[in-house]
Amino acid sequence: MRSLIVIGALLAATAADAQGYRTVIQRTGSGVTVSTYRTEPVPSVIIVPKLSDAEEREKAERIAVWERRCQPIPGPPDRHGVRRMTYAAPGCDTGN
């Protein structure tokens, strides 16, 4: 029975390796452990490039302008303990 488990794990590992995964098979005291890891980037994860110094300064200035206009203040906690923000100007809750 144990040899069937190992053969099944090897077949699964071969199929997974062919699809961009790396499989590690470890023999433990009570059986076999099969771990599978991705070897290719995940298509749903987007790596965002770092901002340049000029872009960082521009972003900081936009945030400062928004904070001066909106004056965000945390409100009292609601029944769930979440503090909602209150703003001095309309549309600030949507980032405008």
Image (tube, grey):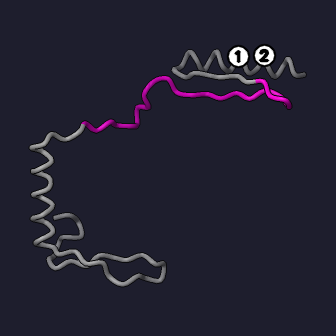
Q: CA distance from mark 1 to mark 2?
A: 6 Å
The amino acid pointed to by label 2 is Ile
* Residue 43 shown in magenta: yes
Name the residue nearer the viewer: 85 or 11: 85
Q: Residue at x 68, y 21 (%)?
A: 12
Q: 10 Å neighbourhood of mark 1: few (<14), some, or many (≥20)?
A: few
* Residue 76 shown in magenta: no
Element type where label 1 sits in the image: helix
Element type where label 2 sits in the image: helix
Rendered location of residue 67, percent (x, y): 15, 69
Region rendered in magenta: 27-49
Q: Is residue 65 above or below residue 58?
A: below
Tell me, for residue 91, which label it has, or none: none
Query: Is 44 positioned to the left or the right of 22 in the image?
Result: left
On the rendered image, what quadrant is the C terminus found in? Answer: bottom left
Q: Residue at x 40, y 36 (%)?
A: 44
Q: State which quadrant residue 16 falls in.
A: top right
Residue at mark 2: 7
Mark 1 touching mark 2, by CB under 8 A? yes
Name the residue nearer the viewer: 44 or 48: 48
- Residue farthest to the front? 53
The amino acid pointed to by label 1 is Leu
Tell me, for residue 11, which label it has, or none: 1
Rendered location of residue 37, percent (x, y): 56, 28
Rendered location of residue 33, percent (x, y): 74, 29
Rendered location of residue 1, percent (x, y): 90, 22
Q: Residue at x 80, y 28 (%)?
A: 28
Query: Is 71 positioned to the left or the right of 39 in the image?
Result: left
Q: Residue at x 42, y 82 (%)?
A: 78
Q: 10 Å neighbourhood of mark 2: few (<14), some, or many (≥20)?
A: few
